[in-house]
Structures are given as C-alpha cells and as structure tokens.
Amino acid sequence: MRVEYFRDGLVEEFHEGVCVGLNDLDKEPYFLRSCAKPLQASLIIDSDIDFTDEELAFCSGSHAGEECHIKIARGILDKLGLDESYLKCGVHEPLARSMQDKMLLSAEKAGAIHNNCSGKHLGFLAVCMANGWDLKNYYQPEHPLQIAVKKRIYELCEVKENYPDTTDGCGVPIVSMPLHNLVIGFKNLNEKYPQIVNAILENPYIYGGENRLDTEIIQKTGMLAKVGAGGLCVVYNTKLNDGFAVKMFDASMPARRFAVFDKINQLGWADVKIDNKIRTLSGKVVGEVRVV
C-alpha cells in the first residue's frame, strides 16, 4: 500500500505501508500499541465491574482529553474511591486542540487524567481492585494484572507463539504480533464481548473525540475501529464479521486516514467522501492524494 501526494504531474511525497485482512497470513509482528485497548477492556467484563456503557467505551479508547472525557474519568475515580495520584500513565497535554486552548486561557495545567490512555489505566485499577491485586505497581510486567492482560490478548488474537513485548508510551507492557492476529482479536471481541463493542459503537466521541480517526470511522460507517501509535489502525465490520488492519511505516496520520477510508470504500463497506484535493492557500486545486 502506498499513499501518494500527486502535485501537478509529480509525486511530491509518498507514504508506504501494509493492509492485512482477516485471512491474510502475514508474518511480520508489530507492537499493537493502543489498538489493544478494546481487547484489554475484556478484563473489566470478566471482573464483573459495574461500569456504564460510557465508562466502558472510555476505558477502551484513546480519548482527546476534552471536558466530557475528564468528567467521566473523575467519575470513575470517585466510583473507585481513588484519586489521580494512582494513575501511572504519565502526563501530556490533551490531544484536542480546543481543550489545549481552554486550559491555556484558564492557566490550567495538564495532569495524568488528561493523558489519552487514562481510561485504560482506570480500567486497570478497577480490575486490580476487583481481584484484590496491588494498586501501586499495576504497570509492571510481573504484576498479576499485566500477566492476565497478555494472556487475554494472546487468547483473543489466537497467538500460538511468543513475540516481543515492549513498554508502551503510557508505561505499561504491550505485546506484538502479526496484523492478521490483531484482526482475529477484534473478531473474537465482537463475538465474545458484545458489551464492549456495543458500548464503543454507541459512544464514539467518548471513545476518542476531536479529530480522532477511530471516532470518525465509527460515526461515518458504523464500524468498529481503533487507532494506535506508529501508524496503526484496525477496522472491523461487525455486520459482515470481517476486518482489516493498516500499518503506515512512517506513522503518517494523514496518510493513514486516506489509506483506511480508501480500503473501506474499495471493499464496498461504505461510500465515504473524503476530500483528497491538494490546494493552495487561496483554494486553487494543484493536485490530489492517491492510494496505490
């Protein structure tokens, strides 16, 4: 797969990647990054934790740190009887530019709760509390939670051999595997954990938010989707029980968006109109983005 920026007769830039379907037998492993979040959330269901659909979607996604997301995060902390200091995901500015502007004007500083992974970490804390596991070291590879997370992901993705692990950006372990196994994981999630899938599809903005590709995919197509760092995106058509994963090698987010929607349209799953024109600042069309 190649995304080309074609401008007045020349390819000015290009981005290469791969697209892997449910039945493709690729062998190259990639770290799942945030694409694993809905799979990890299955432990919330298994632990019989009383979360609303909004809370479940929040814990399954990578939120943009907007006011609606922060409200849910604080509600979960209150429900668990914990404060923000228990979150070990680290601190970064909200992904949403609108929220960055609001916080700048009010001189509010970002905290761990604004981290796009705080929902996942809140889910982890809830699972630890439900199972009587230590809360302070939940992010360490040898912790019972992380052992259970890896086991569950391998089960859902039907992984038969051990692939490399690493530490994700938010400080917890993350596994790698071939992309067709990731798609299999979403197939099994759809079949075995419909509560998670339905929660996500009913709350796409809570799941992601402003300018989040997975939110856009769900809103425009009704299909399950999850983005991950490093140019990843997995899409699953729950009605047809089929899906695919895209990996852009240079991690270009704009190229990933073009590649994913082009594939959805190619498969006939939807007819999403994406503006692929390259324009000058005055609006003159001088080229287009093409997926080869």
Image (spheres, grey):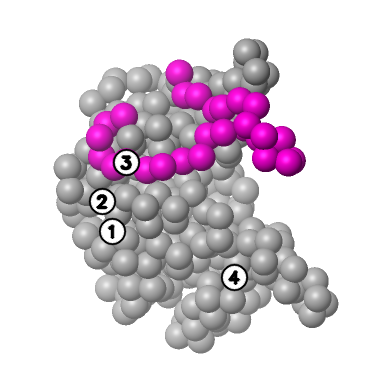
Query: Which-is-in-front pick, marks 3 and 4?
Result: 3
* Closer to the eye: label 4 or 2: 4
From the viewer's perspective, tell me whether residue 9 is left or right of residue 221. right
Q: Quadrant of the N terminus?
A: top left
The answer to whether the residue labelled 4 contacts the one labelled 1, judged by CB atoms less than 8 Å apart, is no
Task: Return the disc, 3 or 2, that comes first in the chain's sequence.
Answer: 2
Q: Residues within 10 Å of mark 4 (few under 14, many from 20)?
A: many
Say which amino acid is labelled 1. Answer: Val
Can residue 160 be seen at all in this image of the molecule? no
What's under tag 2, amino acid-wise? Answer: Leu
**Bounds of the magenta segment:** 266-292
Residue on which disc 4 sits: 66
Q: What's the mark number on residue 189?
A: 2
Instruction: Calculate the distance from the C-alpha at mark 2 to the C-alpha at mark 1.
Output: 7 Å
Considering only order in the chain, which callout, 1 or 2, is on the residue closer to the N terminus? Answer: 2
Query: Which amino acid type is shown beneath numbered disc 3?
Result: Asp
Decide: is 52 above or below 90.
below
Earlier sequence position, callout 4 versus callout 1: 4
Residue at the spot of label 3 = 271
